[in-house]
Image: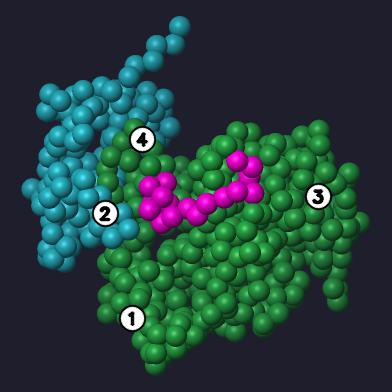
Chain colours: A cyan, B green
């Protein structure tokens, strides 16, 4: 009988313990971050749990669009910008770069791509991963 | 970064498929006009479908099955099995039908669905249509559907945010901002046009609104010059750079975002070998490239366009250079030059200059979005793709009045995009008989 492991819950549970999990393809080594079941690089159906690689780059930074500013989130984390993040051997994903005011966006953009490190943030009833410059 | 190798090659259709009829309602703000207030989803879909059947010279009896599309049956109408909400309105009782919903990509998928049904050999004549009430949503479940209410901007923003994937994406707090400007930002950096992009975007707004103002199917019938006069300003440029057009991101102003509307459109497709039985002006669907990327992929619209275009180019042997008219989803207005570039309709890195030189305008040599586009003509989410098809077919027939392009259209491309998912590149061939 098919066993259905809880991937999403495992990811969020691990954050409670300070760990950031991903899945690695057993065939090509591609990292699925955030974790999914199968490999989106080669199509292999088997992946396994690993901790997120230490090397993560920020490739793009943009100010938050006025249309999509989340006041509750800003009240929780302070200034932030929109970012494209890429862990080693993984695809680029969207996220946010913490502690960046709109005035600081240009200065950071001039340094891209730049290494970043994860910050585990308490949100409304769960922990989440965001980023800051390393 | 590229996802082209993730998308398997397209295969040729088992039999050719052509469009023999189209119909569309104008885009409307139904709640705001006493003549349209109270129109319902079934009525609008029905009017568009009946016009498409009349255009094809058929009746409901001839239709083998139909496809119904809508961007958001939950938030617009609270519909279950939405195809059943329209069936009785245009003579389809007991006929097979399906519903599909791919947000703003719905109208493009609508054509692909119908073409696939006919190409399979299972059905000969398929009606495909879309209807969206993006501006005037259902009131509640205690009243008939003619009683409606405005969908406010706040409600709409909540819908956009809250409809993202809820495993991880929605909680990244970035999907909307990334979708709107990530592609444009990469383009600006790559082409070193930081000092020019404001002029490019304002030029785009000005002439797109002029296209819309000339289009009787549009929700906007005033130009930005008219708006300037209303506010006692000298010119459209002054208005567009004023506080009435605030900057909302790094590059984009309010004028570069969609204008929500209500409306419907439909098309009839049949095997190419049968098309001349119904019309002297069939348009053949040569291929539809299709790629989807989830919202948490930065610049997803660029990468999905690249993959969808790659596939349709490989299938048809045609490139953007062979295309005579380009129509594209532009609920972020810059897609009027980003998408044609990605699809080789205009040279890479020169789209911004084409805008400034007026070459993408209706009177230009490489026209794009002759109807005025989502930010001016209007945007009834899932239906807009079907309106792009309607505009393209009318242009191919030479029936677009003041917005008619100046050259013959043998091939057209429609580049569709939905909110963070489906991108489709459709190539159409004009098979009109000589002199038609």
* Chain letter behind tag 1: B
Q: Residue at x 60, y 33 (%)?
A: B80
- Closer to viewer: mark 2 or mark 4: 2
Q: CA distance from mark 3 to mark 1?
A: 48 Å
Q: CA distance from mark 2 to mark 4?
A: 18 Å
Magenta stretch, residue numbers = B143-159
Q: Is B255 placed left or right of B262 in the picture? A: left
Element assignment for label 4: loop
Residue topped by disc 2: A69
In the image, residue B154 above or below residue B188: above
What's the distance in space between the residues labelled 1 and 2, CA to CA? 23 Å
**Could you tell me if the residues under marks 3 and 2 are in contact, i.e. CB atoms within 8 Å?**
no
Quadrant of residue A37 in the image? top left
Whether marks 2 and 4 lie on the same chain: no
Q: Nearer the viewer, mark 3 or mark 4?
A: 4
Label 3 belongs to which residue?
Answer: B270
Residues tagged by mark 1 and mark 4 found on one chain of the structure: yes
- Asked whether the residues under the numbered discs 3 and 4 touch, taking CB atoms below 8 Å apart as contact, a structural biologist would say no
Q: In 3D space, how far apart are the residues under numbered discs 3 and 2 (Cα atoms)?
A: 47 Å
Sequence-wise, the earlier of marks 1 and 4 is 4
Establish whether labels 3 and 1 are both on one chain.
yes
- Mark sitting on residue B166: 4
- Mark 3 crowdedness (10 Å alpha carbons): few <14, some 14-19, many ≥20: many
Q: Label 1, on which residue? A: B241
Structural crowding at the residue carrying mark 4, measured as other residues with C-alpha within 10 Å and reported as few (<14), some (14–19) or many (≥20) = few
Compare marks 3 and 1 and give the one earlier in the sequence: 1
**Where does residue B100 sit, x and y in percent of width and height?**
61, 40
Indicate whether residue B146 is drawn in magenta. Answer: yes
Subunit ID for the residue under disc 4: B
Q: Quadrant of residue A64?
A: bottom left
> Which quadrant does the C terminus of chain B fall into?
bottom right
Q: Chain of mark 3?
A: B
């Amino acid at each position: 009988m098919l066993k259905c492991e809880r991937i999403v819950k495992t990811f969020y549970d691990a954050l409670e313990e300070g760990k950031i999990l991903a899945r690695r393809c057993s065939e090509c080594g591609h990292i699925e971050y955030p974790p999914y079941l199968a490999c989106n690089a080669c199509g292999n159906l088997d992946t396994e749990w690993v901790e997120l690689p230490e090397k993560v780059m920020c490739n793009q930074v943009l100010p938050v669009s006025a249309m999509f500013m989340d006041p509750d989130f800003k009240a929780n984390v302070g200034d932030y910008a929109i970012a494209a993040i890429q862990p080693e051997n993984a695809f680029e994903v969207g996220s946010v770069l913490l502690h960046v005011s709109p005035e600081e966006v240009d200065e950071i953009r001039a340094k891209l791509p730049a290494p970043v490190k994860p910050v585990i943030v308490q949100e409304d009833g769960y922990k989440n991963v965001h980023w800051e410059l390393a | 970064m590229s996802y082209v190798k993730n998308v398997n090659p397209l295969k040729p259709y088992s039999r050719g498929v052509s469009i023999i009829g189209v119909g569309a309602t104008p885009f409307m703000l139904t709640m705001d006009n006493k003549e349209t207030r109270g129109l319902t989803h079934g009525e609008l879909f029905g009017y568009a479908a009946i016009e498409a059947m009349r255009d094809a010279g058929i009746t409901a009896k001839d239709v083998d099955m139909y496809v119904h599309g809508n961007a958001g049956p939950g938030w617009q109408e609270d519909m279950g099995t939405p195809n059943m909400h329209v069936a009785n309105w245009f003579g389809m009782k007991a006929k097979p039908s399906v519903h599909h919903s791919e947000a703003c990509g719905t109208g493009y998928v609508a054509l692909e669905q119908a073409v696939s049904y006919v190409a399979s050999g299972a059905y000969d004549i398929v009606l495909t249509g879309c209807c969206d009430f993006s501006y005037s949503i259902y009131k509640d479940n205690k009243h008939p559907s003619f009683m409606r209410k405005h969908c406010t901007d706040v409600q709409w923003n909540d819908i956009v945010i809250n409809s993202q994937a809820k495993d991880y994406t929605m909680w990244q707090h970035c999907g909307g901002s990334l979708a709107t400007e990530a592609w444009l930002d990469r383009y600006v950096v790559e082409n070193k046009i930081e000092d020019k992009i404001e002029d490019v975007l304002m030029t785009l707004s000005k002439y797109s609104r002029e296209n819309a103002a000339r289009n009787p199917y549009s929700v906007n019938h005033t130009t930005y010059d008219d708006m300037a006069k209303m506010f006692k300003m000298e010119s459209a440029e002054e208005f567009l750079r004023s506080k009435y057009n605030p900057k909302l991101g790094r590059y984009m102003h309010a004028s570069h975002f969609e204008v929500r509307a209500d409306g419907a459109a439909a098309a009839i497709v049949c095997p190419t070998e049968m098309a001349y039985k119904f019309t002297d002006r069939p348009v053949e669907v040569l291929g539809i490239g299709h790629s989807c990327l989830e919202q948490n992929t930065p610049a997803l619209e660029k990468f999905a366009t690249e993959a969808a275009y790659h596939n349709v180019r490989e299938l048809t042997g045609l490139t953007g250079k062979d295309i005579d008219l380009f129509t594209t989803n532009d609920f972020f207005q810059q897609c009027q030059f980003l998408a044609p570039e990605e699809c080789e309709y205009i040279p890479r890195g020169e789209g911004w200059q084409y805008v400034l030189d007026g070459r993408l305008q209706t009177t230009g040599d490489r026209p794009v979005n002759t109807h005025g586009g989502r930010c001016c003509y209007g945007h009834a989410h899932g239906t807009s793709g079907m309106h792009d098809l309607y505009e393209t077919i009318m242009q191919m027939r030479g029936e677009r009045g003041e917005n008619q392009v100046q050259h013959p259209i043998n091939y057209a491309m429609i580049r569709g995009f939905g909110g963070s998912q489906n991108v489709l590149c459709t190539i159409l061939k004009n098979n009109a008989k000589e002199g038609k």
